[in-house]
Image (cartoon, rainbow, N blue to C red):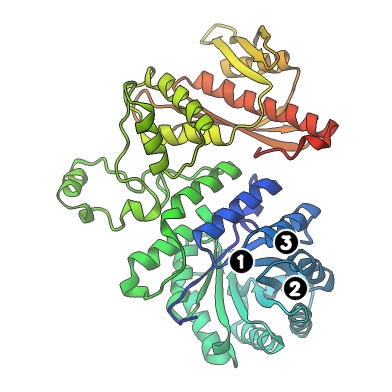
Amino acid sequence: MSDNRLIIFDTTLRDGEQSPGCSMNLAEKIEIAHALAELGVDVIEAGFPIASPGDFEAVKTIAEQVTGPIICGLARCNNDDIDRAWEALRNASKPRIHVFLATSAIHREFKLRMAKEEIVRRAVAGVARAKNYGVEVEFSPEDAARTELEFLAEVVERVIEAGATTVNIPDTVGYAVPEQYAAAIRYLKQNVRGIDNVVISVHCHNDLGLAVANSLAALKEGARQVECTINGLGERAGNCALEEIIMAIRTRNDFFKLDSGIQTRRLMPTSRLVARVTGMQVQRNKAIVGQNAFAHEAGIHQDGMLKHAQTYEIMLPEDVGVSRTELVLGKHSGRHALSQRIRDLGYHLDNEQLNKVFDQFKTLADRKKTIYDGDIEALAELVLHSGPVVWTLEAVTCNGGSGTVPSAAVALWHKEGVIHRDAGTGDGPIDAVFKTIERITNVYVKLRKFSVTSVTEDEDAQGEAQIEAEYEGRVLRGRAVSTDIIDASALAYLQVINRAILREQIKMNPQTGPLGSA
């Protein structure tokens, strides 16, 4: 591999999943792993096999099913962790075991209660045991950014001697600043024997908002692997964002002179997939993949864009998978025009799915003046990821306001062809709708999160309702869009109810098959 080739190590499925509220089921992890392979990442850190049976199964399944990238499993420097990682990875065509041990003074004293000599001994033993399985071995001195440079250099030199081929220098708590972090990489390159024969990796957290800046500073000092996540997911404030690193080195190739194997046009679709699966929505003004990243409202900016796009855009939106112009469709548009635009947006629907989107599109076109790309994407996503339906919304009305008791009336179709109606009250109109749905279906869930956001612009924009609820210890998610936020909320809640019913059916009859995305 040439010296100007940057290795992209994606840890969305391991560190990213550790974000509170971001746990994924097996089907979702496999879906994301395949998307990461299509994106062109070099390494997928699929999980921490000893952490749980679910993590083990995810790493094992991804190792067996996903081809192209190196598949990596995390392990502490102890025999059980390393052996478990190997069991999960043994069927991968390109496996890697990533072992780690903390090295900073605060971790040595308070977490590990180990002297420096014991840290070195265990690090070397861990790398050697992993190496015995005949796989690539990466070593991370946890909290390296707060470790004394002399001791850090000693540990790194010893693990290289033991067989590590990648050495990662993590800023585990996001404490470093670019100049200091770059100096640490420079110090290691100058003082560690054998370091020119291994890949130096960086893994930066974003507690001070410097994860990408620190990673880029390290690349200028010779680091050639960046550990990152889609949308910057990760512990606390998150990790270095993959899409930001990639577009930084691409846009400023004159400065970094680095290339990667990432298919940048897959950045936006992959970002949206991860946001949908985890329920962690991307902030509108986020770099590269935020809704406003290529939007211009100020008159001066619009005038400049009309004269020459590069006056206010340093990247082509098409290069990250964003359509340059919003699609304007109306109620007189035909199926062919809609089908073509759906394909342009990167969706592949069969005839039945297309018919469902077209029917919903016609209904939407009667409700709002302008239909944008975001509206079309929302309809396509709902059709693609909707599961089996027991209950369907027929009608919903509600009342609320000062001095009145919030109430709702709901009519639901059961799959057997019977309409069920009920009415009730609640703390607010939405609460009244949810409680009435629960009474009709006789399924009760614990609501954990509820949000309604605008899918597109203007006063008639669609509202996207997102719900996260708990049912028998499992988290279920629902998502729906409508120009009426009461409709959207009821549809999203009904999606959760249908998924809860399906879980019950699968529990009673395991032959039903695996549940889709929740």
Foreground mark, 1 or 3, reads 3
Front one among 452 and 29: 29
Name the residue rendered at 75%, 77% in the picture.
130
List x then y, in percent, for residue 502.
74, 30
Mark 1 = which residue? 172
Specify the amino acid type for callout 2.
Answer: Glu
CB under 8 Å between callouts 3 and 2? no
Residue neighbourhood size for the residue with mark 2, other residues' Cα within 10 Å, grouped as few (<14), some (14–19), many (≥20): few
**First along the sequence among labels 1 and 2:** 2
Element at label 3: loop
- Which of the numbered marks, if any, corresponds to residue 48? 3
Front one among 421 and 387: 387
Q: Left or right: where does residue 23 sit relative to residue 114?
A: left
List x then y, in percent, for residue 91.
74, 66
Name the residue rendered at 67%, 38% in the picture.
516
Tell me the quarter of the picture where residue 495 sits.
top right
**How far apart, in angstroms, are the residues tagged by discs 3 and 2?**
25 Å
List x then y, in percent, for residue 462.
43, 27
List x then y, in percent, for residue 475.
70, 37
**How far apart, in angstroms, are the residues tagged by discs 1 and 3?**
16 Å
Mark 2 = which residue? 109
Element at label 2: helix
Residue neighbourhood size for the residue with mark 3, other residues' Cα within 10 Å, grouped as few (<14), some (14–19), many (≥20): many
